[in-house]
Amino acid sequence: MDLSTTYLGLRLEHPVIASASPLTATVDGIRALEDAGAAAVVMPSLFEEQIKAEDTAYAMYTDHGSYSQSEAGSYFPDLANYDRGTSGHLDTLQRAVASVDIPVIASLNAVTLEGWTTYAAKLEQAGAAALELNLYFIPTDLTMSGQDVEARYVQAVVAVKRTVKIPVAVKLSQFFSSTGNIARQLADAGCDGLVLFNRFYQPDFDLATLAVKSELTLSSRHEAGPALLWIALLAGRLDRSLAGTGGVETADQVVKFLLVGANAVMTASALLRHGPAYMRTLTGGLERWLGENGHLSVSAIRGLKSVDRLDDVGDLLRAQYMTLLAGYLPGRLAA
């Protein structure tokens, strides 16, 4: 049975990748995922705002009181290896790359073009096999149009692709009026692949203190629908690698993403729930399904249910929507 796939030009033993999570944030965690059979890992994002905050704190604590008397020019010597708050992240990446044989994919979220290019270059130099651009941006300016937001994303991709030689994927949110069009724009800008979809964490409020709080809720299989739909619509029509993420809880979900045309499938919540060893449950289930259904490889099923291969796409689009609404009866929702 051939489970191999190619994602972003990287040859993988199988299509299941451990996406960014606390498990991929340390060298030990990445080693454990490789031992459990992960085809590749995506490290958590390096955030430009976090780097700036660390820079500010470093300057504040090292300079505080340094000129409180004439003899004190500075209480702390300059650190030659202090790399504007990125040194710890880059060190983890370098050690992980040296410690495992599977591809280690870096992730980056920046807010300025300088940030995108500067830190992309540093991640490449640290040994990342590929780079995932985590485009997490919420436009709070009421005068900013959808076209302005899309242009911001495209500019970031163009700038990064001019800077690095490693493959670049873009992790998109599903909140676009025309997802297919922005996907095409990003492909034209040079990205090597798309990850569908980014999962925005929503704010909440503590009613006792009225403070803003956040709560991590792990994804469930019910969240996979939008990514399945859009990969089905893009596969075969957009010459780029496609990865599905969000709601990948079982081997059946892995199979479904491959059927609609994904090159790779990413999971984090399932591994956090069940531990790194659950990776073998996912890959074992995939291999078992292929064998039971007479398929000798992953490539044999990829895209069988994509729009590019279907004679009638109605079930994927409005017809299915209308059927579900018309067929709903009170009391059946829980089933």
Image: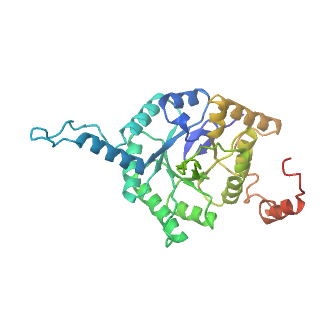
Q: Which residue is most to the left? A: 70
Q: Does the image show residue 30?
A: yes
Pick the front one: 15 or 66: 66
Rendered residue at 36%/44% (across/down): 54
Rendered residue at 63%/67% (across/down): 178
- Horizontal and vertical percent for residue 102? 53, 34
Coloring scheme of the render? rainbow
Pick the front one: 50 or 72: 72
Rendered residue at 63%/30% (across/down): 275
- Horizontal and vertical percent for residue 156? 45, 59
Rendered residue at 24%/42% (across/down): 64
Please tell me whether residue 302 is drawn above or below residue 289 in the rendered image: below
- Residue 274 quadrant: top right
**Left or right of 99: which side holds 332?**
right
**Left or right of 261: which side holds 207?**
left
Please tell me whether residue 236 is drawn above or below residue 64 in the rendered image: below
